[in-house]
Amino acid sequence: MRRGYTQGKEMIDMQNNGKTMRLGAMTASAILLMLAVCIVPVSAADDVFTDNNQTYAAVANYDGARFDIFGNNTYYFNFSKPTGGLNAIHITDSPSSLDGAVYTNRPASGTLYISDTSTDTQYHDDVILLFAVPNSTEHSNLELTLSVSGYQWVPTGSGNKPVLNGSYYNLSTLSETFENTDFLPGTSSWRPAPLDDYPIYYGQGANEQFKIMLIDLYAGSVNQTNLENSGTVMVEYDLTGYEGAAYFDTYAWNNQSAQGQGISWTNKIIGAGSSGWAIST
């Protein structure tokens, strides 16, 4: 059961268009059996996401999406630039190292930060965490507890950077435990990004499949080093009931920007400037 929260195929009917068969004296049950065998799904794909861009996905939070624009606890991925949105948001182990890095062999319990180095918006209204485990691992007893701290403000439609002080900082924007049942249906070897087939982690193999969940951290990021933790979102995590590799990625959402409304930023995971967090238990 959940504990400790605050804030809380497409099925396509196919008809048998084959040749009409004279069934003679076959029984009704035999007819039904043959029809069942003839009905084949259009696609065997079991992807978590319908596309890498201009698609929707739901968050796992008990209280749903912080900005539930569509009324179904989903966020819209809107990478309007063909290769944009990969340089502004990072995962780091310290608010004094805002560019982040690729962190491997991290422990099952620890602290990471989501940093913001954007020069256009210089802020993001909300940060969403992606958590993934290989589908090949046993994860039925998995529990991931998150305790999150960061800045919260009411977005405006202007797209201007918020003017913040200490009163906007929340020591507990989220405190919640997530379970195996919170993973999105299906599996995937890729995640939403401005490029096709964007990996979950740095150095990922081509045929790996993952279970994925999205978690709204209920906090925004700001490119302003004189703020608490340099404007980052602090995430304390504790992973139990699970042995194997696990991964964190991050996304950022804005109510209004040059890219419009939606998730238009994620951590880079290919080439120079990459950042990511890999757990090994």
Image (spheres, rainbow, N blue to C red):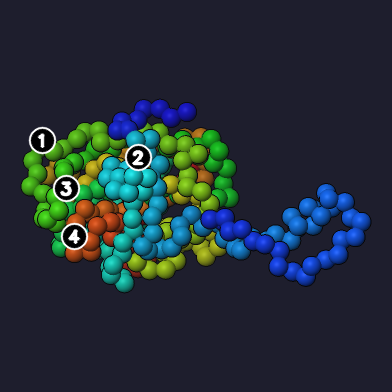
User: Which element is circle 4 on?
Assistant: loop
- Are the two marked residues, 3 and 2, in contact with CB atoms closer than 8 angstroms? no
In the rendered image, the vertical position of residue 259 relative to residue 127, given as above or below: below
Q: Which amino acid type is marked by label 1?
A: Ser
- Which of the 4 image quadrants contains residue 35? bottom right
Res. 167 mark: 1
Query: Is residue 86 at least partly visible in the picture?
Result: no
Residue at (21, 49) in percent of width and height = 125
Where is residue 153? Give x, y as percent. 16, 42
Q: Which amino acid type is marked by label 3?
A: Pro
In the rendered image, the vertical position of residue 165 relative to residue 40, given as above or below: above
Where is residue 176? Give x, y as percent. 36, 33
Residue at (32, 49) in percent of width and height = 70
Disc 3 and disc 2: Cα gap in Å?
Answer: 18 Å
Residue at (38, 55) in percent of width and height = 56
Disc 3 and disc 1: Cα gap in Å?
Answer: 16 Å
Disc 4 and disc 1: Cα gap in Å?
Answer: 25 Å
User: Which element is circle 3 on?
Assistant: loop
- Crowd band around label 4 with a 10 angstrom C-alpha radius: few (<14), some (14–19), many (20+): some
Res. 257 mark: 4
- Crowd band around label 3 with a 10 angstrom C-alpha radius: few (<14), some (14–19), many (20+): some
Tell which of 107 and 254 is nearer to you. Answer: 254
Q: Earlier in the sequence, mark 2 or mark 4?
A: 2
Mark 4 or mark 1, whichever is nearer to me: 4
In the rendered image, the vertical position of residue 201 relative to residue 66, given as above or below: below
Q: Which amino acid type is marked by label 2?
A: Gly
Where is residue 183? Give x, y as percent. 47, 44
Q: Earlier in the sequence, mark 3 or mark 2?
A: 2
Disc 4 and disc 3: Cα gap in Å?
Answer: 11 Å
Where is residue 272? Give x, y as percent. 31, 67
User: Which element is circle 2 on?
Assistant: loop
Residue assigned mark 3: 155
